[in-house]
Image (tube, rainbow, N blue to C red):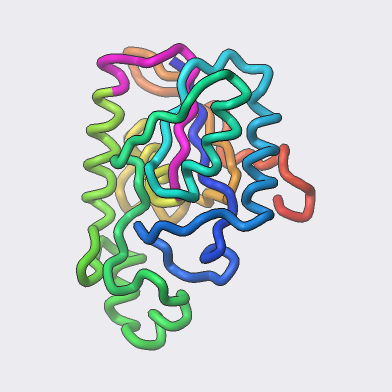
């Protein structure tokens, strides 16, 4: 099975540098253009299934990709972004100013944002998703549309990397990461590829 792991296009809160978590924010015009570019990039591939987080920004990214292949995205709550609790809706600068010690624990370690999830919890639900996917692959070529947090978790789980490596992985809006998956394990073929996007967005 080949997995094409994609972070959703730019959302309104990405543009404003606000922490989204599981807040249901839609795409900007640029984000919709990124989704269209992704659909074009993947159009020649024999995609047999498109799985997406059920949050709007991911669904809006998945829909044009699926449509090019006559498919409908299958919504998977396990692919949601990490829940950032009371930090959701605040800018990164606002959180760092209000709660510098808590902020450092959440993003540099495995602290839990009040009312939210630990990074380890995101990894655990993504690992359960992968177990189900391996047990019953929906197709040979599968697109998975998620978020920065869930795509990082997929990379960690597929490569067996430690949890602490998550924030060493850059995952851009519209970036494509490709894995060839075998019974023995997964091979990373492409990481965070944005060549389909305009040069100024790479």
Q: Which residues are magenta?
A: 133-147
- Residue located at (27% from left, 77% from top): 102
Q: Is residue 196 above or below residue 1?
A: below
Residue 45 location, quadrant: top right
> Which x, y percent locates residue 172?
57, 50
Residue 88 location, quadrant: bottom left
Q: Is residue 134 above or below residue 86?
A: above
* Towards the viewer: 109 or 2: 2
* Towards the viewer: 192 or 44: 44
Q: Is residue 107 left or right of residue 36?
A: left
- Residue located at (37% from left, 35% from top): 75
Q: How many marks?
A: 0
Q: Is residue 97 left or right of residue 65?
A: left
Q: Is residue 163 above or below residue 13?
A: above
- Residue located at (54% from left, 27% from top): 66
* Towards the viewer: 1 or 50: 50
């Amino acid at each position: 099975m080949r997995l094409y792991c994609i972070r959703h296009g730019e959302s309104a809160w990405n543009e404003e540098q606000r922490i989204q978590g599981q807040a249901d924010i839609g795409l900007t015009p640029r984000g919709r253009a990124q989704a269209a570019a992704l659909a074009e990039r993947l159009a020649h591939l024999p995609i047999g299934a498109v799985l997406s987080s059920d949050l709007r920004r991911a669904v809006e990214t998945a829909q044009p990709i699926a449509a090019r292949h006559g498919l409908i995205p299958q919504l998977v709550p396990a692919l949601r972004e990490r829940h950032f609790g009371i930090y959701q809706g605040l800018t990164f600068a606002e959180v760092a100013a209000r709660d510098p010690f808590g902020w450092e624990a959440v993003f540099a370690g495995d602290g839990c944002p009040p009312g939210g999830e630990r990074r380890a919890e995101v990894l655990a639900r993504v690992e359960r998703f992968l177990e189900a996917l391996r047990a019953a692959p929906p197709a040979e070529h599968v697109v998975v549309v998620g978020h920065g947090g869930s795509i990082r978790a997929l990379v960690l789980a597929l490569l067996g990397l430690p949890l602490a490596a998550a924030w060493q992985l850059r995952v851009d809006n519209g970036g494509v990461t490709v894995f060839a998956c075998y019974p023995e394990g997964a091979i990373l073929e492409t990481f965070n590829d944005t060549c389909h996007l305009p040069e100024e967005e790479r």
